[in-house]
Amino acid sequence: MIASERILTRKGHELFFVGPPLLQGPLPAFFYFSLGGEESLLLDPFNLPAVHLQQLPLRIFSMTLPFHEESEDKHTAIAKWAEEMAQGKTPLQDFLTQAHEALLDLLEEGVITHIATGGLSRGGFIATHLAALEPRIKAVLGLAPMTDLSVLRDFEAINHLESVKALSLSLLAPKLTHTHIRFYIGNRDIAVGTAACFSFIETLANVAFEARVRSPHVELFISPSIGHRGHGTPAHIFAEGAHWIGQQLHLL
């Protein structure tokens, strides 16, 4: 059983991580998002990437997504994102700013080297946005990733807002040609949209090609849907994705 450690960065951002102590010096880092920071690393099955990677010489970091604190109901978190955005607030942009600052703090402190990001569902959405903000992120893993808020049931009433449309991953494509991306999704995921996921990957591949990346490192694996609304992720895909991250960080 793995255990996590809680730290505060120089700017006061709370992070949880598993792996060797920070005093042991710089190591590759995988920033993984799913639910609360500690839950993402310790709660089965959300923590399976951390479980599969724990034997490698790296640190796996996580942060608590908006409205995923212990006092909150994670099942209503997406609806609360929509409620906030309907009021003109920016919960996701604010979180991404904090996550990027935390990553920069760790780089300045010299405790991380090669960097990859990843996440499950809403966490995959965050991980991809973070990679667009930070060019030193060289790989992104998305497991049943959310790619477009406007297709979500909780955003149906406000999917016409420009602030919602502006967060679509497809608009980030020009800022992601530097990174390797691998997404996994079910063939009938009606929670985050199989078609929306494919559209993003297709857009990214085309934009990379137009930027003279002749063989874009962009992959999408579609498998039979499982779970509620086809939004589950099988155990073997968690394992495959974790192995790929290990390869991208030059540890396998």
Image (cartoon, rainbow, N blue to C red):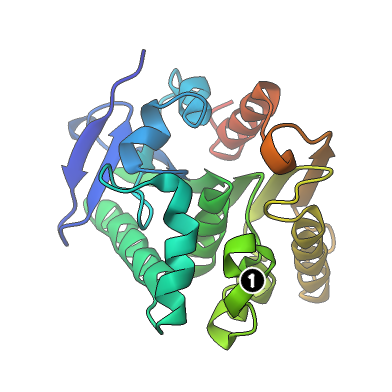
Residue 135 image position (x, y, % from top left): 51, 64
49 left or right, relative to 143: left
Asked whether residue 169 is in view, the answer is yes
Which one is in front, 85 or 40? 85
Q: Is residue 128 above or below residue 83?
A: above
Residue at (33, 29) in percent of width and height: 18
State which quadrant residue 198 falls in.
bottom right
Q: What residue would you read off at disc 1? A: 156
Which one is in front, 249 or 159? 159
Residue 22 image position (x, y, % from top left): 22, 35
Quadrant containing the N terminus is top left
Quadrant containing the C terminus is top right
Mark count: 1
Residue 14 image position (x, y, % from top left): 22, 50
108 left or right, relative to 77: left
Which one is in front, 42 or 251? 42
Residue 225 image position (x, y, % from top left): 79, 36
Task: State the SS at label 1.
Answer: helix
